[in-house]
């Protein structure tokens, strides 16, 4: 069965005024969901990404000089805050697994991609 990556896009402004206690409850929902998937043998991996700017690496033209800059910045309207990798028979099952991901309940969106293994 193939693996699918759930890229968790979030809108940082939705968490601007969240109290530490509220954040603990949010994290508990993710842990509960992750534990349920693990027990069902559907979770392959996943992590939250740091809230720092990261780095963007790109070549401006084919064969061009590689440029590195800070970003993407959390001030943007849409950042990838983390990911999960799940094992599913097909996109339909991967969608079914994703439907109760707490990320959706907290205003995020999920980009679902099948992982290509050569």
Image (spheres, rainbow, N blue to C red):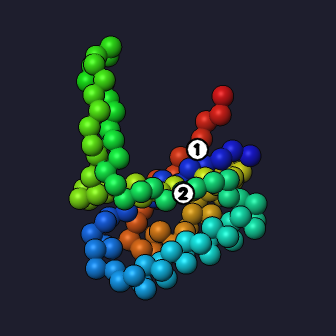
Q: Residue at x 48, y 80 (%)?
A: 24
Q: What is the x, y in percent for residue 68? A: 29, 33
Which-is-in-front pick, marks 2 and 1?
2
Q: Residue at x 60, y 49 (%)?
A: 4
Residue hosting label 1: 114
Sequence-wise, the earlier of marks 2 and 1 is: 2
Which residue reaches farthest left? Answer: 75
Q: Quadrant of residue 36?
A: bottom right
Res 92 seen here: no
Estimate how packed mark 1 is, as few (under 14), some (14 to 19) or many (20 or more) residues with alpha carbons within 10 Å: some
Q: What is the x, y in percent for residue 11? A: 32, 64
User: Does 69 sit above or below residue 89?
Assistant: above
Q: Residue at x 34, y 33 (%)?
A: 57
Which residue reaches farthest top? Answer: 63
44 left or right of 67 in image: right
Q: Residue at x 27, y 43 (%)?
A: 70
Mark number, residue 6: none
Estimate how packed mark 2 is, as few (under 14), some (14 to 19) or many (20 or more) residues with alpha carbons within 10 Å: few
Res 76 seen here: yes
Q: What is the x, y in percent for residue 89? A: 71, 51
Q: How many marks?
A: 2
* Viewport quadrant of the C terminus: top right
Which residue reaches farthest bottom? Answer: 21
Residue hosting label 2: 47
Q: Quadrant of residue 40?
A: bottom right
Q: For the residue labelled by badge 2, is the local secondary structure a helix, a strand or a loop?
A: strand
108 left or right of 75 in image: right
Q: For the residue labelled by badge 1, is the local secondary structure a helix, a strand or a loop?
A: strand
Label 2 vs label 1: CA separation?
17 Å
Q: What is the x, y in percent for residue 66? A: 31, 23
Q: Between 14 and 18, which is closer to the camera in this rendering?
A: 18
């Amino acid at each position: 069965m193939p693996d699918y990556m759930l890229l968790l896009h979030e809108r940082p402004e939705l968490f601007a005024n969240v109290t530490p206690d509220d954040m603990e409850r949010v994290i508990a929902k993710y842990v509960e969901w992750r534990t349920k998937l693990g027990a069902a043998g559907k979770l392959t991996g996943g992590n939250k990404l740091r809230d720092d700017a990261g780095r963007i690496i790109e070549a401006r033209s084919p064969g061009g000089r590689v440029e590195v800059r800070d970003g993407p910045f959390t001030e943007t309207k849409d950042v990838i805050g983390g990911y999960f990798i799940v094992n599913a028979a097909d996109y339909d099952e991967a969608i079914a697994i994703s439907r109760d991901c707490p990320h959706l309940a907290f205003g995020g969106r999920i980009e679902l991609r099948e992982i290509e293994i050569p």
